[in-house]
Image (cartoon, helix red, strand yellow):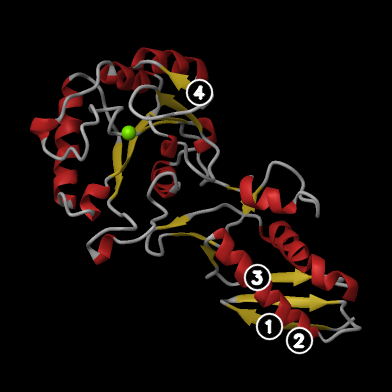
Amino acid sequence: MTSVSQKWQGLTIEVKGADSISKETVLDECLKEWLSFLNQMDFFCQEPGHLIVQDILPDDISGNLSFWLKRAWRRERAQMATYDEEQDQLMAHNVFWQKEEVTSQNLGEVFKNDLLPLTPAGDQRALLLDRDGIINVDSEYVFKKEDVQFVDGVDELIREANQLGLKVIVLTNQSGVGRGYYKEEDVIALHQWMQEELAQKGAIVDDWFYSPYHPESTEVQYKKSSYTRKPMPGMALMAAKKHHISLEKSLMVGDKISDVLAQVDIKTLLLVGNYPVANYPHLCQSHHDVIKEMKQFFS
Ligand SMILES: [Mg+2]
């Protein structure tokens, strides 16, 4: 059996077994499909790799090429996903897994809805907290300590998490930076101050992550749909990598539907009261509810 191969973005695509049609045509089709697949999935191939597309019959080409490509990709290259900060993207040599077997019937659905990147390895469990509405009262674009009012029960929640041996990590969208309302230095200084205030009450926060970006930012360096901006999971993946966290074994607490992170498998509680949460299934009325749920989840 002969085969031809072609390189694209460092990935070798090799086609075998399509004897009755031009293999170059297959390769062209592959690349076309591949590009549209990559664009669709919003990730980028940079690492060298090797994808083998086997036994493509002429009849399969038109309808099923993309299916075979994706299946081959998934089978051959399923590894852990990592978030690349410099590229602000998931790296493509790290692939997705899905809960169910992909078939030609459920392919579209699985790849659109159920694709989850594997999270970086680690056994550490964590309590991931949204900031505005969970740590401090959400009075919109808070950046000065004078404007911070800590939410009732937040120190107790963090102390309980500390006692359970969890990492406590804050993930906060701070588009106020991108919108020009305040600077990154303000965010960093505020977090430092909040950290100290909480520590005085025995509540230890291990790390703070913020995303200063916004697609409509007036400042060019902040104007983008960043993978770090919730609901995208960039900040959670950064935290997971840095602190060796298993997101599947961790708990997220927020107050907005966008705190329910896309693509990663992490149980998320939403605190009721600040934003519409529709029929979201895991709602809490107060931080005491959150503490109860947290203890149950980690027991
Ligand atoms: Mg919030």
Quarter of the figure with residue 95 = bottom right
Ranked by sequence position, the earlier of labels 3 and 1 is 1
Q: CA distance from mark 2 to mark 4?
A: 52 Å
- The kind of residue on which mark 2 rests is Glu
Quarter holding the N terminus is: bottom right
Q: Is the C-beta separation of discs 3 and 2 under 8 Å?
A: no
Residue sitting at x 80%, y 84%: 23
Residue 138 in the image, given as x and y percentages of width and height: 24, 31
Residue 185 in the image, given as x and y percentages of width and height: 15, 50
Q: In the image, is residue 179 above or below residue 275?
A: below
Residue farthest to the left, as pictured: 146
Instruction: Tell me the quadrant of ligand 1.
Output: top left
- The kind of residue on which mark 1 rests is Gln
Task: Specify the label residue 6 is tagged with.
Answer: 1
Mark 3 lies on a secondary structure that is: helix
Ranked by sequence position, the earlier of labels 2 and 1 is 1
Name the residue carrying label 2. Answer: 24
Q: Is the C-beta separation of discs 2 and 4 under 8 Å?
A: no
18 left or right, relative to 114: right
Q: In the image, is residue 10 above or below residue 141?
A: below
Which of the two discs, 4 and 1, sits closer to the camera?
Answer: 4
Task: Specify the label residue 34 is tagged with.
Answer: 3
Residue sitting at x 47%, y 41%: 261
Between 217 and 46, the one nearer to me in the picture:
217
Residue 70 in the image, given as x and y percentages of width and height: 71, 61
Q: CA distance from mark 3 to mark 4?
A: 37 Å
Mark 2 lies on a secondary structure that is: helix
- The kind of residue on which mark 3 rests is Trp
- Rate crowding at label 4 as few (under 14), some (14 to 19) or many (20 or more) other CA atoms within 10 Å: some
Mark 1 lies on a secondary structure that is: strand
- The kind of residue on which mark 4 rests is His
